[in-house]
Amino acid sequence: MSDMVYTVALAGLLHDVGKFAERAGMEISKQYEQDNAGLYQRYNEVQKRHTHKHALYTAAFIERFINLIPALDEWNAGRTGNSLINLAAMHHKPETPLQWIITQADRLSSGMDRQVFDGDETGTAFRDFRKTRLIPLAEEMRPDGKYENSDTLDSYRHRYHLRALSPAQVFPAFKEAAEPVDNAAASKEYAALFAAFLTDLENLSHRNQPPLWLDHFTSLWERFTSAIPAATVGTVIPDVSLYDHSRATAALAISMYRYHLATDTFNETAIKASTAEKFLLITGDFYGIQNFIFSSGGSTNKAAAKLLRGRSFAVSILSELASDRLCRKLLLPPTSVLLDAAGKFTLIAPNLPETIAGLAEVEVELNSWLLRHYYGEVTIGFSSLSAKPADFEKGSFLGLWEKLGKAADLKKYRKFDLAKAGVVAGYLDSFDNTLSICPFCGKRPADLKTKDDQYLGDNEASCLICRDHIHMGAKLIKSKSMAVISAGVTFAGNRLKEQLFGCYQLSFDLDKATSTELAKSGHLLHMISLARAGESPDGSLAARYISGYVPVYSDGDRHDKRFCKEVLGESGDAKTFSHIAIHALNHRSDSDDKFSGVEALGILKADVDNLGKLFACGLPEERLNLSRLATFSRQLNSFFALYLPNLLTTDIRFQNIYTVFAGGDDLFLIGPWNRIIEFADELQAQFARFACGNGGITISAGITVDKPGVPVPTVADQAEQALESSKHGGKNSLTLFGETVTWAEFRDLLTKRDKMNEWQQSGAMGKALLYRLNELIGMAKKEREIRESKRPIDIRDMACLGWRSRLTYTATRNVGKGMDKTSRTAALDEILEELPAWLLRLDGKLTIALWQVLYNQR
């Protein structure tokens, strides 16, 4: 890939860095301003002054910190006026064709909205632009199409704090808390953020290797500019981050550069033309992800924790490497990938014959490898759609995005070329007669290369793929970085037994000397900081929030009397699901050595409701553009991939909950059953906080409870069915113990649970009444079904109507047996007043409260 490709990508990323620098108060001399204002800034004849001062600051920033940026081919670029400084800073006053490409990409990224790229400096007072804070898209999106006052700034109640990306920064705050009181305070916030940005910029690794450095810089840029509004003056709503706008600009610019260069149309007129189909939007989608993660057939409970973590990680890394392989084939930098989460990515490429041919070639290559190793269990599909600049303009982007979505949906029905897929050639011949089938997947042959592997144990053997999944699951717990290396390269340290897609090798323990050597030779393709929950990522490397959270053994577990008869793993190793289930036991109040409750796992699956409708209808057509789409997608992914793992790490209630996957818009967790139920309440509350209380953006979940010995594929399927029940039950709901309730009903049921616990602890309610209540709930539910049924009532069905008398009889005999007469009478009156009302209003739903009480006290 040529230096000019990286120069164009970097110019797209940095074209608005001047906004950051200007708002932070970076000093530029009067002389510099006088010498360069006419070069980079427009001149307003009416106002008799230069406008768009941020362009001047962009030039000053690059000139001042050019030594912190890779030395690209500046000499040749400078001869044509296309130096990095000119490409980035002249986007409001372009002169050369390449400068016009950055300008057009900037405009298309914002939907050709003149309020954004012209900045008429009306509406929001120009003097207050530093005080303006990013508005969360979640507050304004309306899937029902009711966009009330969405075009007025004062109608929005929330803003993001001006801070670097962090778990806390995922959440907006009320406007009064986030917006500084005056310009002095606003400037101080920007200055602090800018200073931290410069410190990490100076420390970025691999400055002499532009491909690696650009990956690191893009991550750094996201960390420090994802809360900076891209536009702050005029009447524009500042809901697009500087990061997402500039990344979209970079992706569009690269495609335009490649297109016009290849079609011999590298001139201003052609570049500004809006009707030629210059772009190819490409979506990559992994199919069969859940079947892959929860693959059955072998003893999948064996090493289940590490195996599941490894499989989940494999989905993330295979998706990223698939987009990487495609970008390398199409000669695109990684900045061309706009969306990448939960096994799906979208990138922008030039619409050229070689692009279409390369796309087909890579799809065949990747699926051939997947078919050989996964036997059709998981595949990848590429769908594409050509687009013209006019499709990105104001009011047109929705139609383009919907067409791409339909193309992706059609692809799901033709995942394979049936002429090439079928019987796996040489399958039986691949078995070693001294070994059997892999004990983990039950599909692939065990391989001698895994015999006595440190991750499998003595006399154990598995297939290469499952060994690698266990290896990755183990390494993710302790490793802080991951290197992606060209296949076939020799280096010291652990590695995969089977190279990914036949061209990528992974290392989780690459030392600095080896890293430097591989980088110089071009064999180090990526060096990634694994941003583990609760820890700050290595600021010198590209960060990926894909490692999730896994509970590990600690010294405290060795002193926990619940484990007195258990053989525990070493400190820092992942806990087994059996030991996670033990954490569901509760200390009894009458003894430190005795415990109550059941050892069981809770399995939670959740995802965002109506996400497709949110993307399609969440904003007025004239406001939906590429940058807004990228901004909301990234913000949503940050909630699941960044915030939730941190919550599990830092909240003592949830530190034994295991992340199977968390990213995109969905979540799958396994933990002690009672902690999972507590977590569900917290999940919905925090998601509502993320969504600014917007009732149109909701989440649904399903929870099942099982013993730890139940096969993982079985519990995964049950959790999926529970989630489906929530979706079919009206969404914005939770299904637990087979009952579907709204989140408000769930919280009400938690108070009922606490009340029953209170009655039992006071001696008012004994176990006999609790178990009888389980029967009465069924009778009350049956009564409601009869009342709502339109069919004739059979006399035999009417026995359920006797639940009231049975309740009175049982309560009278059992309530407060050990109490004095006065206390017993008061308790009986309260119970006979409360329980009938609960049963009438909730019937079967009361199971959610009752079963928690029963399970916790067994």
Image: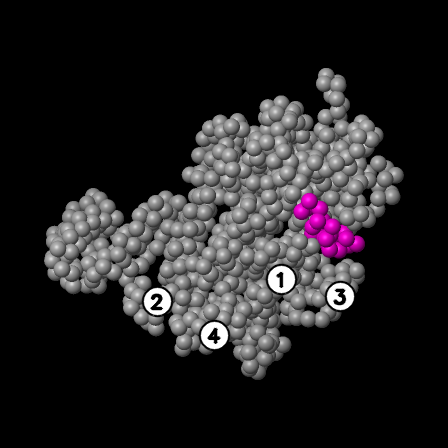
Q: How many marks?
A: 4
In three-dimensional space, the C-alpha distance between marks 3 and 1, rounded to whole angstroms, equals 17 Å
User: Mark 3 or mark 2, which is nearer the start of the sequence?
Assistant: 3
Please name whichever residue, 359 or 34, is drawn nearer the observer in this view of the structure: 34
Label 1 packing within 10 angstroms: few (<14), some (14-19), many (20+): some
Q: Which mark is residue 680?
A: none
The residue that label 1 is drawn on is 480
In three-dimensional space, the C-alpha distance between marks 4 and 3, rounded to whole angstroms, equals 36 Å
The percent coordinates of residue 399 (x first, y second) are 56, 35
User: Mark 3 or mark 4, which is nearer the start of the sequence?
Assistant: 3
Instruction: Look at discs 2 and 4 and give the one toward the viewer.
Output: 2
Label 4 packing within 10 angstroms: few (<14), some (14-19), many (20+): some
Please name whichever residue, 459 or 55, is drawn nearer the observer in this view of the structure: 55
- Report if residue 299 is visible in the image: no
The residue that label 4 is drawn on is 568
Tell me which segment is drawn in magenta: 195-216
In three-dimensional space, the C-alpha distance between marks 2 and 3, rounded to whole angstroms, equals 51 Å
